[in-house]
Image: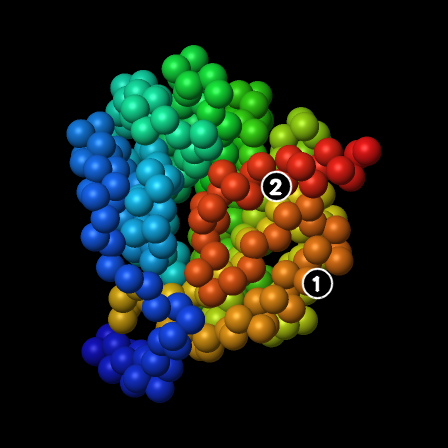
Amino acid sequence: MENNIVSIRKNESKLAKPDWIRVKAPVSREYNETRELIRENKLHTVCEEAACPNIGECWKEKHATVMILGSTCTRACSFCNVKTGQPDLLDPHEPERLAEAIKKLGLRHVVITSVDRDDLDDGGAGHFAESIMRIRITSPGTTIEVLTPDFLRKKNAMELVVKAKPDVYNHNIETVPSLYKAIRPGARYFHSLNLLSKVKEQDPTIFTKSGIMVGLGETKDEVLQVMDDLRAAEVDFMTIGQYLQPTPNHAEVKRYVTPDEFKYYERIAFAKGFLMVSASPLTRSSYHAGDDFAQLKKAREESLS
């Protein structure tokens, strides 16, 4: 293990972070206010747990991606900084507290995600549905985006979330199929594609969304094939961002993809039929999600007119 860490550190020294992915440390008053509100309501955020580089910008605007079902994941993906191990006890009051926090923040758009909960019969789908229902009651003007796990081997879990009618159903493919064994060993590529396809089959009015990280060793042709697979599943919105290694024990960065390459991916993705595409070094699933949703809705209206 020690030799592996040394090897990773050597790789990092060769791959110094380029200027285009450097961000300022969060210091604003609004950032601190958002952080206090998160603490007061005992909420977890993927912004903190996954060490998101955009936390300063998003929290300054009082945008936060809340993470339900506890802070401990039952899986151990090699790219993810969320801790893994014995999961937290399910908090029956979490959906209610979440709805109250969103009301206090006055969010126009909220993103709800979670850890994997393979220990639960429904994978946590009921908690997602309850959270959506509570938010609809307390903040009827807020649009809701869910970023769910894959609910692998959890019968009717996805259907339960869809019946609660989120505005956007997001599930990330994360990477190309050839890297799944190393990067996402507990998941199955075609299961994730099938989940996204079934969401659209069950309720065509819900926007579907998915994203991948690049810089893990994938080829351009593999990225383009993922685009084709997602369009075959009728996914509306795709995000593409640079993978950043959270600790020396995680998968190493193979390459920093240039801004021009991201623009290429964005152009090709639009040409393949996605209604909305966000592709940049700092793009993450929830980055500017509210603005993107508004554009996504507009793009659908234009495509139907």
Residue at left 25%, top 41%? 30
Residue type, label 1: Ile
User: What SS does tag 2 mark?
Assistant: helix
Q: CA distance from mark 2 to mark 1?
A: 18 Å
Residue holding disc 2: 295
Residue 19, visible in the rendered structure = yes
The correct choice, above or below, for 214 with respect to 148 in the image is: below
Residue at left 45%, top 53%? 284
Along the viewing direction, whichever of 114 and 28 lies nearer the viewer: 28
Left or right? Give the position of 190 relative to 251: right
Residue holding disc 1: 268
Residue type, label 2: Gln
Left or right? Give the position of 188 relative to 134: right
| Quarter assignment of residue 32 | top left
The correct choice, above or below, for 277 with respect to 178 in the image is: above
- Image coordinates of residue 67 in percent, x first then y, are 34, 38
Left or right? Give the position of 32 relative to 224: left
